[in-house]
Image: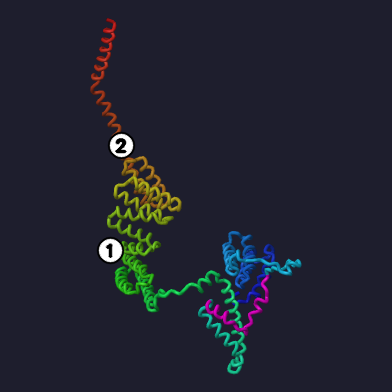
Amino acid sequence: MSIAQPLESMADIETALEIDPLSYKVRCSPLIAFFKATFQMAEIYYQSTAFESALVYFHRGRNIRPAARDFVLGVTKAETAIDNVIGEATGVKFTVSKDAQDGDTNILSTELPGAFFANFKPDAMFSKKHLRQLKRLMGKSYYAVRHIEQLLVAEERLQMYLKNSTEIHALVKEAHRYLRIRSEFWRQQEPMYRRARKTTEPKSVKEEKGPSRGDLKALQRVLHMLQDINDVQQTGDHEKTLRLCLGLRKDVKSLNPGILEKQEIMADIWAFEAVSHFQLQNFQEARDCFGEQLKICRDEGLQHHIPRCLENLGRAYAKLGSYRSAESVWIERLRYDITGLDKAWLHYEIALCDMELGKYEDAIVHGLACKKTAETEFDLNWELKAGVLIAQAHFALDNLSEAQFYFQNAQYTAYVLNNQTVERLLTEALEDVDKAIETNERKAVEEEYERLFNQAEHPMLFTIRNRNQDFDADLEKGSGKN
């Protein structure tokens, strides 16, 4: 198949298909080998421009293995190739030949005719029309075809000056045959509407010029410099990273504005600089650099960079104590696609900001979201962190029973993780919760005792009031009788 000899490869594949896959004893799965053979047969027909036969084998493989993507794509590309060759189905008219009228039913054949390849004789010259089509289809390879044809014509001269002219002629003949087959293939593959568009559309008066060779070299040098900055940053030399970023930014500003990657490179430079400032604990500079990166990404539509920018910018705000800004940035980050432990981390950071801002109800909501994600990912560490945070928020709201429940769950998780330090701290926290519960219970008892004591200190008020009410009732009864 690689050297454009489909007849030979077809014979091998037919031999493979004749073997019963259920009785064929090989190391690999026999069914897999059978499916591969079917797919290769379809590819051979497709590369030989016998698209109908290729479609038959692609359909056969898809019926056997409907989930195989290769066969599904093969059916699609074979049908597309057939449409490109014959055009729309509405313009096709079928005629009945004389052989068909006589009763010959074996007119259509799925076999690839051997005469198809025999027609490509190496010494046959192209027509002028075919040469024009070939030049348009093959581009720069067209001149290689012309050179090979000249070598074929000059066989006698080669024999006069070269000892191995026969071998050279054989190689040239094979290359010429291969190029003829491929040119015919691409001629049939190119859609008709595309060919019409190339011939009818006028050329634009002013074509856009791409980057020059000098611009490409400068861009390549900048990309190598970015890789060097990344390597230096990975070693921990952040001071040198900042110096390299400063110099590279000047070089990038001098690039041609027409280079599409220029703004994306500037965003990467700001990101490298921000990370180095963050590691050096220059949080204000890190915040400014992350902000510049985010601005470029939004202006240039670099959507795949924005989520990471928001995460890093939120970290910088949190380190500066700007918890409200950090919360706002991280909530915006939630609008983008995020899954797994990254989602657990983000909800946890938002909950911490809510705790600092005194928004304990919101902290509980985000803490529960973090805990749910951690349980889905089977990560006990994040489950432990979320449980402790939820318990602290309930404790701040004086929901002591809920706080006690989540502290106990977190203590058990720490026991499972064999984290004795956290387990000891949670034991102390539970003691504080128990003391608070005991204090609240004692306070409730004291309030009830005080109420009862005040009621018992003035018993006559209640007694006299009751006796006076009875006396008034007797008077009313007596007056009624009189």
Q: Is residue 190 left or right of residue 115?
A: left
Quarter occupied by residue 482:
top left
The residue lying furthest to the bottom in this view is 160
Quarter occupied by residue 237:
bottom left
Q: Residue at x 25, y 20 (%)?
A: 459
Report the coloring of the rendering: rainbow
Q: Quadrant of the N terminus?
A: bottom right
Residue 177 circle label: none
Is residue 166 positioned above or below 428 on the image? below
Q: Is residue 286 left or right of residue 76?
A: left
* Residue 131 falls within the magenta-colored stretch: yes
Q: In the image, which is nearer the foreground, mark 1 or mark 2?
A: 1
Q: Is residue 27 visible?
A: no
Q: CA distance from mark 1 to mark 2?
A: 48 Å
The residue lying furthest to the top in this view is 482
Q: Position of residue 226 (x, y in %)?
A: 36, 71
Residue 285 circle label: 1
Is residue 371 positioned above or below 251 on the image? above
Is residue 12 positioned above or below 412 on the image? below
Stretch of the chain drawn in magenta: 111-136
Q: Position of residue 177 (x, y in %)?
A: 61, 80
Q: Would you name the residue on which mark 2 appears? A: 440
Camera-side residue of 12 and 183: 183
Q: Residue at x 27, y 10 (%)?
A: 476
Q: Residue at x 76, y 67 (%)?
A: 102
